[in-house]
Amino acid sequence: MRSFSPRMAARALWQMRVRRRPFVLSHGINARCNLSCSFCEYWRRPGIEMSTPQILHMLDEAHDFGIGVYNAWTVEPLLREDLPEILSHAKHLGLTTSLITNGLLLLKRADELADLDLLSVSVDGIKSYKELRGIDLQDVLEGIRAAQQAGHEILMNCVVSGKNVGELEDLVHLAESLGCRISFEPMHESFGIEEKVWGSLRIRNIPAYETALDRLIEMKRSGAPIINSVTYLKMIRDLEPRFNCHASDIILHVAADGSVDCCRVHQEPLGNVSEGLAKVWQSSQERRRKIVQGCEGCLFFGYVENSLLYEFVPEVLSHYEWI
């Protein structure tokens, strides 16, 4: 297991700013999930999944294109039986391998993830967890412990909503007690979800939310294992995306069926990996530029922090830990 470093940040900047190519391949590796969280759009639209040979070929092309990170996520990566083979291939090519999971299958499959560098587990609450995810938190914590016993360092990632805003400090303490790091980002109200769901999750007590984020900033400065930058934490405290988004220049997004999208917010197909990654990237430059120009902005952790890295923000450059 390894986290990011100034050397990795330098490599990322060379690829993004000098070569003008993405550094991360973000792959929605399947179209299935073992949960049905009310706020998630992805499990509601099952569809075609790329075959193992198609994915391995995509990884070969990604390596040739200079991509340094392969991130497998959504809907639930651990449901793919061929996941170890995919990670092994990416690792053999020299890519840093990353995985985002709900954690429910870690107890069963943690020993199969020897070629994984970065393991993120979604933990959105303590008392509120079952209401948010529909399962017992203890089941996920057992999976985290199993993954740690298998040699993995864990990042707990928390999506902040009106349901868990009072538990953020407790989540940091939980991460500390488990020997994990933790990240936070505010919930993004995506399309395709009923308004009554967002109404139940939306942050309404803004003063309490701001106080909770100020406490996270204080804890971060005191050495708590929060990987978000203070710059980012202040931004999400104020719920204002004060940054120039470079997500479409940094990250190449591939859906389960192989379609290439601009980003998680703008899921407009720009092409398909069957056409060749380099070709799709080059042919979609103008369309991606127009999409970004018309975007109102978001506060997704990976987009903000990596855009700040892209713009040489000193704090992010010196403490670049996770993609």
Image: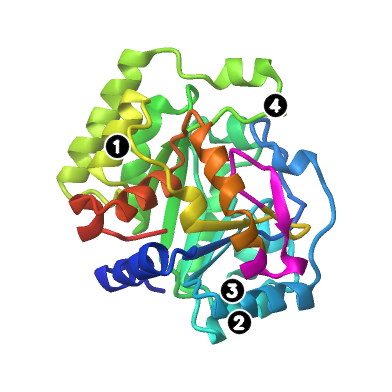
User: Badge 1 local density, few (<14 within 10 Å), some, or many (20+)?
Assistant: many
In magenta, the rendered stretch is 261-279
Q: Regarding mark 2 in the picture, which secondary structure is present there?
A: helix
Q: Is residue 287 left or right of residue 18?
A: right
* Residue at left offset 33%, top offset 54%: 310
Circle on res. 193: 4
Mark drawn on residue 88: 2
Identify the residue position indicated by label 3 in the image.
62
Could you tell which of marks 3 and 4 lies nearer the N-terminus? Answer: 3
Q: Is residue 161 magenta?
A: no
**Relative image position of residue 198 (x, y in whole percent):** 60, 20
Upstream in the sequence, badge 1 or badge 2?
2
Residue 233 got which mark? 1
Residue type (three-letter) at the residue carrying disc 3 = Ala
Query: Which of pointers 1 and 3 lies earlier in the amino acid sequence?
Result: 3
Foreground residue, 174 or 115? Answer: 115
Quarter containing the C terminus: bottom left
Farthest bottom residue in view: 92
Please tell me whether mark 3 or mark 4 is closer to you in this view: 3
**Would you say 217 lies left or right of 69 here?**
left
Can residue 112 be spotted in the picture?
A: no
C-alpha gap between disc 2 and disc 4: 36 Å
Give the CA separation, mark 1 to mark 2: 35 Å
Residue 157 percent coordinates (x, y): 45, 47
Instruction: Please give the name of the residue rendered at 55% of the width and 22% of the height, measured from the top-left corner.
Output: 201
- The first of marks 2 and 3 along the sequence is 3
Q: The residue tagged with tag 1: helix, strand or loop?
A: helix
